Image (cartoon, grey):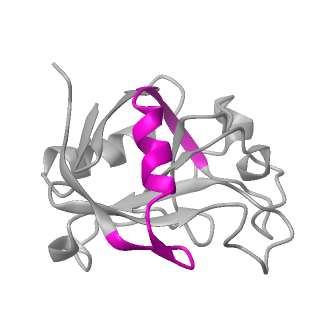
């Protein structure tokens, strides 16, 4: 996968063998073109989460705002305890509220984030998040996005996803 942003390119490999439902869900949005014109809208740094006991570092992106209210049905959570994947530096994972609520938003880890794995303490439910791939090129771009101007955790302005496509 190649995520082209207005700050540069990020290449990601997906682990369909370990997280098949999550990868299929992500590709459903990719193939429908819903990430084109999307945005990285959230940056989480050690300094902008004062109310959290367990701190993380990620950037979060999502679909084009025109599709924001048209997500597909949520998918079941493929827990890291079952997939064997871990939230290491550069891992891409699905954002969620409760278990089994992930739709189109995703995040990329900056540094190792074990509190996002199954049994981790970031979410009160301890279920973790569904990791499904890893950045292979462009972590410098990920860090540039994380360091972009923000108000609290909201990127101002968001970083545009020019395109998000399968690499052939």
Indicate the position of residue 63 as horizontal and vertical percent values. 26, 63
Indicate the position of residue 166 as horizontal and vertical percent values. 20, 30
Q: Which residue is drawn at 76% across and 48% down?
A: 118
**137 left or right of 89 in image:** left
**161 left or right of 102 in image:** left
Residue at the top extreme, as displayed: 168
How many labels were placed on the picture?
Answer: 0
Quadrant containing the N terminus in the rendered view? top left
Is residue 47 shown to the viewer in this render? yes
Residue in the foreground of this view, choosing between 39 and 62: 39
Q: Does the magenta stretch include residue 105?
A: no
Indicate the position of residue 47 as horizontal and vertical percent values. 71, 67
Q: Residue at x 64, y 32 (%)?
A: 83
Q: Does the magenta stretch include residue 151?
A: yes
User: Does residue 19 lie above or below 93 as drawn?
Assistant: above
Indicate the position of residue 16 as horizontal and vertical percent values. 43, 27
Quadrant for residue 153, please give it: bottom right
Quadrant containing the C terminus in the rendered view? top left
Quadrant for residue 82, please give it: top right
Residue in the foreground of this view, choosing between 116 and 130: 116
User: Does residue 130 lie above or below 135 as drawn?
Assistant: below
- Where does the magenta region start and end? 130-157
Q: Residue at x 35, y 48 (%)?
A: 25
Is residue 20 shown to the viewer in this render? no
Residue in the foreground of this view, choosing between 61 and 111: 111
């Amino acid at each position: 996968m190649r995520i082209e942003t207005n700050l540069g390119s990020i290449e990601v490999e997906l682990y369909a063998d370990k997280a098949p439902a999550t990868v299929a869900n992500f590709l459903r949005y990719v193939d429908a073109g819903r990430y084109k014109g999307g945005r990285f809208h959230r940056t989480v740094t050690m300094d902008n989460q004062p109310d959290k006991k367990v701190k993380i570092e990620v950037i979060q992106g999502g679909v084009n705002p025109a599709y924001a209210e048209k997500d597909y049905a949520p998918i079941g959570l493929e827990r890291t305890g079952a997939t064997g994947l871990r939230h290491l530096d550069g891992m891409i994972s699905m954002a969620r509220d409760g278990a089994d609520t992930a739709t189109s938003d995703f995040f990329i880890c900056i540094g190792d984030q074990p509190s996002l794995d199954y049994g981790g303490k970031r979410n009160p439910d301890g279920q973790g998040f569904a990791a499904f791939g890893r950045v292979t090129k462009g972590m410098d771009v990920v860090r540039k996005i994380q360091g972009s101007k923000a108000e609290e955790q909201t990127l101002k302005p968001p970083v545009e996803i020019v395109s998000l496509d399968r690499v052939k």
